[in-house]
Image (cartoon, grey):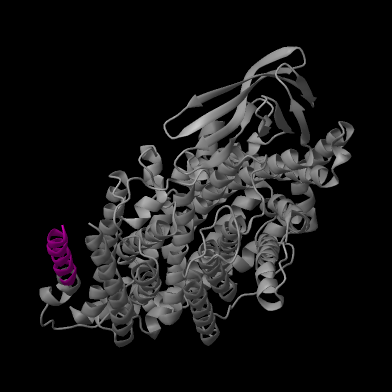
Amino acid sequence: MTFVALVLGGILAVACVLYVALPFLREPAPSEDRLDEPGALERRALELAEQRDRALGALKELEFDHRTGKISDHDYRELIGPLRRRVAETLRALEPRAESNEDRVRASS
Amino acid sequence: MPELGRAALVLCLGLALYALLGGAYAAKTRRRRMARSAQNALLAAFGVSVAAAAILLTALLRHDFSFVYVADHTSLELPTPYKISAFWGGQEGSLLLWLLILTGFSAAAVAFGRRTGADLLSWVVPVLGLVTTFFAFMLVAVSSPFDTQVAPADGAGLNPSLQNPYMMIHPPFLYLGFVGLTIPFAFAMGALLARRSDELWIVATRRWTLFAWTALGIGQLLGAHWAYVEVGWGGYYAWDPVENAALMPWLAATAFLHSVMIQEKRGMLKVWNMLLVILAFCLALFGTFLTRSGVISSIHSFTQSPLGPWFLGFICLVTAGSLALVFSRLTLLRARTRMESLISREASFLYNNLLLVALCLTILWGVVFPILSDAVRGEQITVSAPYYNFFLRIFGLPLLLLMGIGPLVAWRRASLRSLGRSFTWPAALALLVGAVLLAFGAGSSKAGLVAYTFSAFVLGSIGYEFVRGTRARRALAGGSWPGALAELIARNRRRYGGYIVHAAIVLLAIGVAGSSAYDKVHAQKLRPGQTLAVGDYTLKYRSLVQRESANATETRALLDVRRGGDSLGTLASGKNNYRAEQQVSNEVGIRSDYLTGEDLFVIADQINPDGSVVFKVLVKPLVNLIWLAGFIFLAGAIVTLWPSAAEQRRLAARYRELRPLVRA
């Protein structure tokens, strides 16, 4: 039993080592070995996209709460303006980035 | 093949260590192949853990008593299902189950995480590697399930109280919950290490957290039901330190699930959410430490073992390391928005968070104080039920009320006029229910009456939310009421799934209040032919019978039960004498009335040689609502966990347009 266990253990160990080494075996000499990392621009863009989604979600929520009667007409009128402005601001803030992305894509092709 | 089991565990340790060190090196130096290799190490660690678990399970099923673990926890007579549950019935096996689930979850997190973000995942891997290294090291060096001996003729058997069907599923569910909390912790720490202030880690772990929280909740209810039917003292929760050990991380995770919504919707409470994730994970580790260290004496804990100092050291390391990391990233976590009003949905979530954390820390103090007292002053002190019940009322009743208030209040701010309109119906219902209950004599327990009144308010507010939402949906899209309701839930699964979970918690509260504040207890010695009365019930002790089962001698006292003039049949209550284990267990008789939710609970406390029996009889009103709450809780959790196509599309669009950030 010990011999069988030894052989099976050996096979298991070799299989594990091969699997762990697979990325190096597949690409022994890659042209590029860097992990993607967001730059300052991408981090800011993601933050803006989150703010945009948050503002859009809040707008949707407000509309629904108003429709169900949880928000009075008076409160709705007070809240809707600043929220719409917030959505417009985040959309505007994301727009230049979209253009610069297109420029980047054009430049790289 | 214990050698192969040991080899598999050593391999697992090596792979986890590689994931930790290689993964950290890859993340720090931004090496793509190295990061991928470290991820593969975690995937392979799962493979070898499966091999180790399969070897132990095979040994248990084949009565291989040359394994010390198998001989200590099974016997030839033990029925097959309990041979399987013996896997987690002992210290070493349960630790192996921890490792198996941990590596399984880590492998799944890596597989799914490859789609979410390479830079985040590269830091998550070493964190998962660290936790896996600790558990693999424990199994290799401190508490191995593969120790061998000269095989004895028979094993010692399994603790009788563990020979119950609930033991087949209760511990695995708890472990799914405990271990599941590792994933949000690893992603939170990964986000901090990667210096990411966005919500990707929350998006990536939302379902993990919900799953772990659901499993922990269901696991506790299964444990409560096991205690109710098996332990034989007439209750389901005794504020035992090990029971509390499962409740504390669940409370912290509940707080996190609420506060994370404020971060998602308002971009606030980033530091608080990090602290809650750390608290939930550290409490899960602390619970594991309590069960295994031998520092407390509990029916649920394993015996004294050398694991304690190792666990304590690891908990200190994780707590100190993660808190230091949070404080080093405070600038990154600073919120840019503020709470607009103290009367708003987010404010109610915040109050709920403060109460949940206060309750959690109060319970923690109750658990830790006797240990500290023993260690520092050498005094044996027990913190018992009155302490916990007091704080449960102080924090639990306002929490219950908040569950009703939250859904009625709008995000950002609410005017008093809107509030008045929203509160009218639920408050009127609550006052009516309170008045009716008072008239029927429920005022004998003030806390019970308040709990019922608040419960009515919460159910009213949840019902009102469903009605208003369905009406609005129908006004918008037309169609039938059921169709509009289904559409309403499908469009916002988290909100309405959450309401279903709230309804389950209310049922739980009603069940707990009813069965503890309004129960009846009666103890009496009876000879065959004699009767006793408790509440509306009359019990006549008919006879004592005995039979041999596969591994025990079963003695049962048979009682004829009547209520009013109606016969309700026969109830059997007695004891099992387990031959191999040489232990006796109480086997209670329970008659459930599913219409009223009431149980008649009979314990044969003492069976005398002359055939007389000392019975303890309890009438527990509404106790079955607790178990019903479990099913509703699960249904609500499934609704919340179910993927929403619209949500998936929205998130996919967000990360697609920022592809450089999220490419794996």
Q: Judge whether residue A5 is colored magenta.
A: yes
Q: Position of residue B187 (x, y in %)?
A: 43, 70
Q: Is residue B479 visible?
A: no
Q: Which is nearer the eye, B496 or B575?
A: B575
Q: Which residues are magenta?
A: A1-17
Q: Main secondary structure of the magenta part?
A: helix
Residue B91, magenta (yes or no): no
Number of marks drawn: 0
Could you tell me which quadrant the N terminus of chain B lies in?
A: bottom left
Left or right, A40 with reference to B440: left
Given residues B423 and B363, the one toward you in this image is B363
Q: x%, y% of residue B261?
A: 56, 62
Q: Residue at x 10, y 80 (%)?
A: A28
Placement of B261 over or under B161, stated as above or below: below
- Left or right of B93? Residue B414 is right
- Residue visible at 30% across and 75% down? B19
| Image quadrant where one finds the C terminus of chain B | bottom left
In the image, residue B235 lies at what x, y percent? 67, 42
Name, please, the residue furthest toward the front: B609
Q: Look at the picture and state if B326 lies above or below B416.
A: below
Q: Which residue is at a point 24% across and 77% down the rendered structure image?
A: A105
